[in-house]
Image (spheres, coloured by chain):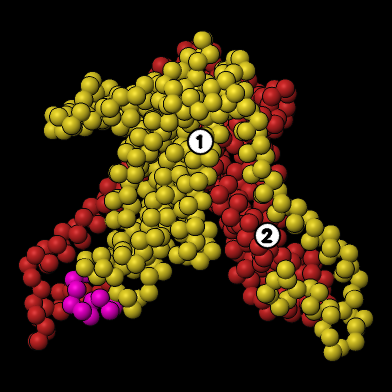
Chain colours: A yellow, B red
Amino acid sequence: MPGPQPVEGTTVTSVPAQPASPLLKAPGGEIPDRIFKSGMTVCGLAVLGVLFLIVYELVAGSRLSWHAFGFKFFAGSDWNPVSEQFGALPFIYGTLVSSLVALLIAVPLAVGVAVFTTEMCPKKLRGPLSFFVELLAAIPSVIYGLWAIFILVPLLSGYVQPFLAKTLGWTGLFEGPPYGIGMLAAGIILAIMIVPIISSITREVLMVVPQHQREGVLALGATRWEMIRVGVLRNARAGILGGIILGLGRALGETMAVTMVIGNRPEIAKSLFAPGYTMASVLANEFSEATGDVYLSALVEIGLALFLVTIIVNALAQLLVWTVTRGQPARGHA
Amino acid sequence: MPEIAGTASVQPGVPPISWRRRITNHVMTGAAVLTVVLVLAPLVAIFGYLVYRGLGSINWAFLTQTPKPVGEPGGGMANAIVGSMLILGIASVIGVPFGIGAGIYLAEFGRNRFGTAIRFTADVLNGVPSIVIGIVAWAILVRGHGFSALAGGVALAIMMVPTICRTTEEMLLLVPQALREAAYGLGIPRWRTTLSITLRTATSGVITGVMLAFARVAGETAPLLFTALGNTFWNLRYDQPTAALPLQIYWYANSPYDDWHRQAWAGSFVLILLIVTAVAAVRYAVRRGTFGAA
């Protein structure tokens, strides 16, 4: 299918009314052009190739485990390399719960920051503020983990967890010994890590909302907050949701920081103080030491599950953000 | 936004804004300010500790020696710093040409369905967890061959391509169409136009994309865990297990020794410094280069 652009190389050389001028058949035209185009196409194909390679390797690698356990793999909670019994439920639970905690903390913060930068703060502050928030996205995961181990975890076990246990302990979500390390710590560090993604996409989406929308609502006598709620946020819902889902995708696959603070115990506990384990963490901890084909295959199957979940989540988010920003990539930075 | 909400109530003929609405307005403004404070607090805390603990822990031994045996104080991460550079070098050599090539394809030839498919794939690849990419690199290059710097580099290269590809495309599309037409008008073949005129004009933007990708993978730990594996000795060969700064930080942070914790902070500081300097240096060079050429 020929592209809509008028400047295809062939269009220029074959302008119908003119006889072919020798100038247009400059040396080094046709054949190098064709080589160049195929070279670039190969690079483009490589992107598709990588995705196929990932799918192929994960499916091929997990076949053994799939044959041994089938669907029970995702329902069983017994993870025992010695007796070669593998059930991934505790890891799935840990991944979902830690990401959910992260979203609960991160979404209000990120949307608040985006609203403040686009609607409230003086124009001069806008640039530096979004720069600082997005700086958070540039910090490597392992440094978040290091910081969490030595600063966040003592803070949690010393002050936050005793307080939560006293005030909200009756819910059952905040009980047990306050180790600091556990699901709550993982959720908090994940929240800090996904705030910049959600807020930068929300900011982009809010800026796309037409100015007359705001002026219209204000002209009806709305206060600034009412203007933001009715005129801006309501219009940007789909895009904000896309940003949130993209943040979720990042939280699901985040490995190092979580592995360092979640406690790494394959148990399903109601309390957020209890240690847990995530799909990514079990790969980080056990993959390089796994002995036995079934063990290794079970780990690859966890990788496959993680891949599929993040692909679905990301594709959904991409589509939502694409509909709002029309084809611009949704990234954690801008 | 200008102060419109406050003035509306005093105009004649306009009903005054009720107390409830006014208070809600102030409360929500306050809440938005609070979120900014809450988000910036960890940033300040992390950078503060990084400088405070990191800068205090860096010494000559840290920068020039290899790790001491377990539990023994002293030693350093020199081999990890060099190993990281080796792995990142391999990643860049593979990832940058493919990324830019794919970006050129999308911008110059990809205004069709196939291009959209690649675009979508690149955006989706961007979200694949890094540890999963580690598994794939392990399956292709480590199984049967052994851990190597090459496997780590390939894993990181896979992560670089989508980012570079998309930013390159964006930057090339910003180059005015008239520039291309002018080149075609002069009889310059298409490949030459793309490389020497379009790409050349967009150089600084493309480099920014490359540096973004570089900064992102420079701190990656998960895909190196079972590809480059790590090493307590020097290694400069592409086919041997290689130490990397993020891996070393990870192990030292999880160790029970105070001196290793100290070194983990020092390593983090060096890692951040490495990323910032690399990005700044390249951007500086590019700015000078393009001005010189123009």
Q: Image point 35% across, 76% down: which residue? A: A211
Tag 2's secondary structure?
A: helix
Q: Which residue is mark 2?
A: B114
Q: Amino acid at mark 1?
A: Leu
From the top left corner, tell me how far across and down residue B235 is, in percent: 68, 25
Q: Image point 16% across, 64% down: which residue? A: B25
Disc marking residue B148:
none
| Residue A245 against residue A187 in the figure, above or below | below
From the top left corner, tell me how far across and down residue B27 is, in percent: 15, 59
- Residue sitting farthest toward the top: A82
Q: Quadrant of the N terminus of chain A?
A: bottom right
Kindly report the secondary structure that dominates the magenta region of the rendered protein: helix
Tags 2 and 1 in contact by the CB under 8 Å rule?
A: no
Q: Does A197 sit left or right of A274 as displayed?
A: right
From the top left corner, tell me how far across and down residue A169 is, in percent: 16, 29
Residue A262 is at least partly visible in this image:
yes
Q: Quarter-wise, where is residue B205 in the image?
A: bottom right
Query: Magenta part of the protein: which range?
Result: A215-224
In this orientation, which residue lies closer to the viewer: B130 or B251? Answer: B130
Tag 1's secondary structure?
A: helix
Residue B58 is at least partly visible in this image:
no
Q: Does A190 sit left or right of A25 as displayed?
A: left
The chain letter under disc 1 is A
Q: Which residue is mark 1?
A: A306
Q: Amino acid at mark 2?
A: Phe
In this orientation, which residue lies closer to the viewer: B188 or B278? Answer: B188
Q: How packed is label 1: few (under 14 Cα within 10 Å), some, or many (20 or more)?
A: many
